[in-house]
Image: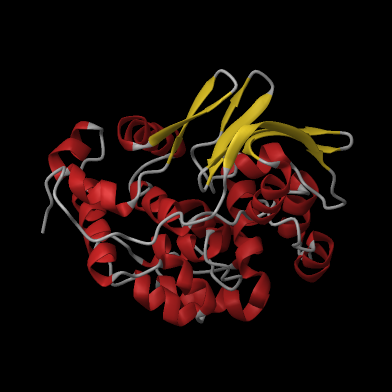
């Protein structure tokens, strides 16, 4: 199923946040939470935040942000008013997560102790589910620089530009827009075999009128079963979306770095089935599995 540009098509309920753009607003977001912003934004969760001229630049929903840590909190510039920006940014950075309690619960072996000591303040992010899904479909047989390059090409070509100071950022294109593009155009942007998957996922979302955000209110197993129905979404991609956008703290994505950590540090067999290792991790770390996975992933990846 395909649409031509200009042809009527169903509308997908994407980015319907009621954020109103206005004059550029600047403020300091004070918080008492532990936050290592640099590590959080460079830990393989997101791929479109850019460090430039002493600021991190990015888009959350339809709002553009420039942020940097200061002694008093986060210095923030945004295209929405400070009240909306504080709410959006606090939610995105999950500043309500009690990291101290999580550390007390999980840092009980030498590897997690070392990971927490080195990357204390790294937080899980709460992303838009659609952008997160596209990002991790893009991540298959790839690496972080290439993922960032592919996503940048996509948004610069098909995203809606938003200006913040002298910086042009881009709102992520909706499924409606993606479905109109066509496989060939995506392959020209470097998406390769993933192009077909992305178009098919966008079309299925439109046809079913499924709001991915609604998966936050169902169980881990139910949400995962929905995601696995999309061609191109396997166990790992589904678990990444569940962790980084759908508030499923028991999800435990396993990529090559987590596999290495599980084999080298926790005695898991390299030939074990993915679901069996996930079940083992969930039985060991429970509702903290997602945070454990992120610390193990980043710690093991940075060891090389």
Quadrant housing residue 243: bottom right
Quadrant housing residue 50: top right
Quadrant that contains the C terminus: top right
Q: Report the front residue among 279 and 110.
A: 279
- Image coords of residue 149 (percent x, y): 39, 31
Height in image: 118 above or below 290? Answer: above
How many numbered markers are drawn?
0
Q: Report the front residue among 2 and 183.
A: 2
Res 300 seen here: yes
The answer to whether 175 appears left or right of 288 in the picture is left
Residue at 66%, 56% in the rendered image: 91
- Image coords of residue 194 (percent x, y): 25, 48
Residue at 26%, 71% in the rendered image: 208
Height in image: 55 above or below 243? Answer: above
- Image coords of residue 297 (percent x, y): 58, 52
Quadrant that contains the N terminus: bottom left
Height in image: 107 above or below 174? Answer: below
Res 254 seen here: no
Residue at 66%, 75% in the rendered image: 287
- Image coords of residue 37 (percent x, y): 71, 40
Question: What colour scheme does the image use?
Answer: secondary structure
Q: Report the front residue among 132 and 164.
A: 164
Height in image: 233 above or below 250? Answer: above
The answer to whether 233 appears left or right of 110 in the picture is left
Residue at 25%, 34% in the rendered image: 190
The answer to whether 10 appears left or right of 113 in the picture is left
The answer to whether 281 appears left or right of 189 in the picture is right
């Amino acid at each position: 199923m395909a649409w031509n540009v200009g042809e009527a098509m169903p509308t997908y309920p994407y980015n319907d946040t009621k954020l109103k753009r206005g004059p550029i607003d600047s403020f300091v977001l004070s918080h008492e939470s532990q936050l290592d912003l640099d590590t959080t934004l460079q830990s393989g969760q997101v791929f479109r935040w850019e460090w430039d001229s002493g600021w991190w630049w990015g888009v959350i929903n339809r709002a553009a942000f420039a942020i940097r840590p200061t002694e008093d909190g986060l210095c923030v510039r945004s295209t929405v008013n400070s009240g909306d920006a504080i709410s959006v940014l606090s939610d995105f950075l999950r500043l309500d997560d009690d990291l101290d309690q999580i550390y007390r619960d999980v840092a009980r072996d030498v590897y997690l102790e070392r990971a927490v000591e080195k990357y204390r303040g790294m937080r899980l992010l709460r992303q838009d589910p659609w952008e997160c899904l596209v990002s991790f479909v893009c991540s298959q047989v790839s690496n972080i620089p290439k993922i960032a390059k592919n996503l940048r090409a996509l948004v610069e070509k098909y995203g809606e530009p938003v200006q913040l100071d002298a910086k042009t950022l881009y709102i992520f294109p909706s499924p409606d827009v993606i479905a109109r593009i066509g496989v060939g155009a995506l392959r020209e942007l470097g998406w390769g075999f993933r192009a077909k998957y992305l178009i098919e996922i966008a079309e299925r979302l439109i046809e079913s009128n499924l709001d991915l955000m609604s998966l936050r209110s169902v169980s881990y197993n139910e949400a995962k079963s929905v995601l696995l129905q999309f061609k191109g979404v396997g166990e790992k991609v589904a678990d990444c979306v569940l962790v980084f956008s759908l508030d499923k703290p028991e999800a435990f994505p396993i990529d090559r770095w987590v596999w290495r950590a599980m084999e080298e540090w926790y005695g898991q067999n390299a030939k074990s089935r993915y679901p069996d290792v996930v079940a083992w991790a969930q039985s060991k770390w429970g509702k903290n599995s997602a945070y454990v996975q992120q610390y193990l992933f980043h710690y093991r990846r940075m060891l090389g």
